[in-house]
Every structure is written in C-alpha cells, then in structure tokens.
Image (tube, coloured by chain):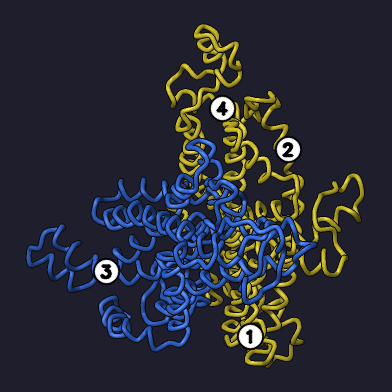
Amino acid sequence: MSVADLVLVASPATTAAAGDVPPRRRGRQIVARIGSGLAVLVPIVFISSFITYSLGALSNSDPAATILGQDGATPQAVARMNRALGLNHPLVVQYWNWLVKAVHGNLGASYFTQVPVSTSISQRLPVDLSIAGLAVVLAILIGGSAGILAAVRRGGWFDRGVTLVCSAVSTLPAFVVGIILVVLFATTIKIFPANGYVGPTTSVPQWLEHIVLPGLALSLQVSADIARQLRTSLVGVLEQNYVVGATVRGLPRRRVLFRHALRNAAGPAITVLGYDFPLMLAGSVAAEAVFSLPGLGQLLLESAQTRDIPVVQGLLLVISSFVIVVNLVVNTTLNVLYRTNDGTSA
Amino acid sequence: MSAAVNDVVARGRAGSVLRLRSARIALAVLAAIAVLAAFGPTLAPQGPLTLNTSSLFQGPSWHHLLGTDYLGRDVLSRLMAGTPLSVLTALEAVGIGMVLGIAPGIASTFLGRGFDFVANRVADALMTLPSIFFAVAVTAALGNGLVQAMVPIGVLLAPAYFRITRAATLEYSRAQYVEAAELMGASKFHLVTTHVVRKVFPNIVVTTASLTAGALLAVSFLTFLGIGVQPPEPTWGGVLSSDLDYLSQAPWAPFIPGALIAASVGALNALADAFRDRGGRGALALPQLAQITVRTGPTLEDANGSQRSVA
C-alpha cells in the first residue's frame, strides 16, 4: 500500500455514512493506516538523510586540515584527526554512524567553534517556531474566514474581492511581502519594530511585537491558498442535498455551516496547509533575512559561507524531518476526518 | 472524458490560448523580459556599476527613469544588466529538472514495478528537502556560485516533472489506440516515442511554465540572500536587498525590483493557467512537496481551473 492510497479526497458521499463503524474497529483502522504510512516513510527518511549526508563528501573540503589550522596540519595529525572524526570509513559506514548518532540527538560539532550542532539548532529553533506558528494561526484565521465568507456570499463583491486579492498575493514572494510590510508598518507608520527578536521568556508583549510582521509576511501566501481551496470546496458542499436537507429541517444556518458543511469542505484546505509547509520554511528564511531574526536560516547562511559542513547537514536533517512529520500529521488528520465504512480510503 | 477525446480537445484548443487576454498580456511581459535577457546589458542607458556620489537616492526622473541607489547608480541600468543572470540560471534549473524528471517519468510506466517504486521513493525523498535550504546547503559543498546553487533547485524540480509525465504516460498508455497498436505488434519503444511522448507534451508545457516561475523566484531569493554573487554585480534580488538597507532614505525603492520579480513570476503563472484552461494539464503552481502528503486529487485541481485529475 503506498502513501498515495492512504490519502483521501474529501467526498461528502462517503463521509456522510462514516458514523456506523464500531469505535474499536475504527481505532484499529486508524492505527493500521498510520502503520502503513510509516512503512512508506522509512525509505523516504533514509534517502533524504543520505542525500543530506552526502553533501559532506561532495564538498571536497578537508575538515581535518580546517580544524587543525595551517600550522598543525601535518600528515600524521590529519590522519589522526580523520580517524577521530571517522572519516577514514567508506561513505555508507560514515552515513550510518552519523544517522545512529543523530537519532540519539548527537549531530556532531561545528568544525570551527566546536559547539554541538544540536545546541546551536535548539537555540535558534524557537525563533522559527514562533513565526511559523503565528503564521499558521494567522493563515487559518485570515484564510479560513475569507474563504467561508466568500463561499457564503458567492458572487458578491466580497467574493470577487477575495479572488482578486488571492491572485495578487500569490504572485508576491514572501520576501517582497515582508519588505512591503516593513515599509508600511515599521518605517512609514511606526507601530512595529522593523527588525530584531525578543524571546517570550524575556517579555511576552515584546515577543509578540517582534513576530507579528514576520508571521504576517509568512502567512499571506498560505492564507490565499486556504481561502481559495476552502471557497471552492465549500461552494460545492453547500449545494449538496444533505446540506439543503439540514436547512429544510430547520437547523440553524450557523449550525449547518459549521457542523455539517465545513467539516466536509475542510479537507482540501488542510491538505494545502501541509502542502505549503515547506514553502513556509523557505519563507521563514526570507522573513529572517528581511527582519534580521537570529533563526535557522541565518545559521544556515553563516555555516554555508564558512563551509561548516556538520552544521549544514544537521540543519538540513532537522528541517526535512519537520517536513516529514508535518506530512504524517496532515495525512493522519485527513484520514481521521474522512474515514470510510469499509476501512479503505475514499 | 477518455484520454483520447481529451487529447483531441486539447490539441484543438492549443492555438486558442492566444485568444485569452491574460495569455496575451503574459506573453508580452515575457517577451520584454526575453529581450532584456538577451540585450539587457547592452541596452542599459548607463553603466550599471557607475557611481555618482552627487545623486544618491534620487526618485524617478528623465535622467534616471527608475531613480538611483545608495551609491548613485542608475537602478534601471542595474536591473537591465542583472536580467540575463537571473533568467539564464532559472532556465538552467528548469533544464536540469526536465532532464532528470521526464525520462524516468516515462520510463517508470514501462520498466516495471521495481523501477517505479524506487523512482517514486526517490521523488518523495527529494520533496522533503525545502528548496531554498537545500540550495544554500549545496553551495556550502560546491562553492558559492549562483550556477552551483541552481543545480539543487533543478534537482528538486525533477520530482514535479517526474510525477506529471508519469501520471500522463500512465493514462495515455492505457488508451485504446495504444492498446490497438500493441496488439498490432508495435514495439514498446515505438509505442513510447510515437504514441505517448507526443501526448504528454501539453502537460510538460504547463508544468514548465509554472516551474520556471518557481525557479525565477528561487533565483531572486538566493541573490537577495547574497548567495552566489559578488557585491558590485547587479542582480534583481541584490538590488532589492540593498534597497532594504536604506529604507529610511528611500522607502519606495524596493517596490521597483519587487514589481519586476512579481510581474515575471505572475506572467509565467498566468501563462500556465491559460494553457491549463485550454486543455493542457500540469502541476500546481509550486509543487514543492507532493505525494507524500497528497495525491493531487480533484479537489486541489478544481481551484486551478479546469485542470482534470491525472491521478
């Protein structure tokens, strides 16, 4: 069973009948699906981490000589250092050792500062988690409400406005949006700081102040995607017989919309949120650059310039693991939301 | 609609793409950019590196149509001179993606399940690597150059080509006329080259248009980050990046390179949409990550106009 088979497409006809499966069997189905999803993910994890590790071998750099410096790099010292770093083994053995250590949280140390890679990553991670988290919340709020309103008022001026704004936003890359926001809200109307970062442990209001603009810059594209997907699917669902039926039976409009229609229409929007996640990671590099935030992207740029391979490898591994985990979460959410009677995907 | 009928419709409409106003505007914008890419540095009214300390941060004027930057250099000339590098490296990435993606995409439907499984897992794995992160990481290994940085971008575009050609090939290779040809004794090679590749072509056109937009965005972003270019050399992203440092003096400045990037990306996306509306099919605007999350189901495609399910 491939991942593709696991994935479903929101289909009201099948989901409407989903309530009859006994709870225990349903639980087992979900576990089975997560299990087979993992089985497909394992080769993906191996291949992508191998690509990541191979960057070191591609680099042609001589880490032992770099660490020892010009004076200390005698052939004997280089050979000893290579043994100490495990670089005398074949690439596949090196990769396996690196991966085993990485699973235990040890990503090696920077060639230059000797600071453990996991330490520098965990120092920087909160910055990106803050802006990406805020961006997801904003995207769901902005995109979700715009999409719902546009679908409910289909054909009205609000609907046309949403469509127009969405296509405008989708041509603007995150770094351009970020710069526009800086020009508008930091240099012209000075209500937010143009750059810098303050941790939430230091001051929560200041933290929020510093992450609002980067978070907003990151969220706009995703908001536009969510709004478009939600509008399209909600328009379709609202025409379904069971929605008309619920309305005819006299259920309140709000209840019909949120309990009946939205649940079945949300699938594509959730999918697109998972789909856009790597885009948001790229966007967070942009946001860090525009707002000079000390995040993972800046760490990557610095270590790429100095060719600090362990840091680069560690960062890439962490980022791609994030993408894989988010995908798994999105898939599982969709599976739980749209499970079907016979245990197969729609 | 069966594949064959769909194809006839697609071919009948291929010429009518130009009847869409959005497609005509998009093509005009792209033609202008192509001219800039070919002759930009020679057409530039002033030297892109000429300093003029007596006219810093000037607004648009007759002498400097788009104003001057923090060293008094003419912004229009810098953008024109920077066009070839941005466009050519974007095309480099798309070319790499095509070569690495299309051949295995067609082959995987003919070479059996083993090859198909492996190719799919490799495509999945590549899609877990965010493009900008990967590109910057590769410059750490291969050296700091834009040409080097666009190689990984091209490699990451390959899964999109792979998926779209694989899906289209699968669909067309099941069409009845292909079956008929097979029964008449045509070789596999003949089937692929004569009957399938030509049918897959419209899908590749749509994919290429939207992936070129993505590649152009990646180039601008990498040059914005300062990857692969030495400071005086003009690039789209570089102009934007230096504008950002002097916002207090010239808050309007970033809008000029920003608009140029947005216009070229928007034109390519509009062109892709036009092709899609007129019967071709293709990937989503930026298929960064796909199948490990989702098979591009009909719901995703509905939002992209009349694109039909290829899955």
Residue bearing the label numbered 3: B172
Tag 2 subunit: A
**Amino acid residing under circle 1:** Val
Q: From the image, state whether disc 1 or disc 4 is nearer to you.
A: 4
Q: CA distance from mark 1 to mark 3?
A: 38 Å
In three-dimensional space, the C-alpha distance between marks 2 and 1, rounded to whole angstroms, equals 48 Å
Q: CA distance from mark 3 to mark 2?
A: 49 Å
Is A13 in front, or is B166? B166
Q: Nearer the viewer, residue B182 or A58?
A: A58
Q: Are marks 1 and 3 on the same chain?
A: no
Colour representing chain B: blue
| Residue highlighted by disc 2 | A122
* Image chain in yellow: A
Residue A25 in sight here: no
The verdict on a common chain for dots 4 and 2 is yes
Name the amino acid type tagged 3. Answer: Tyr
- Give the Cα distance between marks 4 and 2: 19 Å
Q: Which mark is residue A69?
A: none
Up-down: is A265 above or below A297?
below
Residue drawn at x 47%, y 37% as measured from the top left: B142
**Residue A35 visible within the image:** yes
Observer-nearest of B141 and A2 = B141
Residue identifier under label 4:
A100
* Of callouts 4 and 2, the N-terminal one: 4
- The residue singled out by tag 1 in the image is A243
Label 3: element kind: helix
Which element type, helix, strand or loop, lies under badge 2? helix
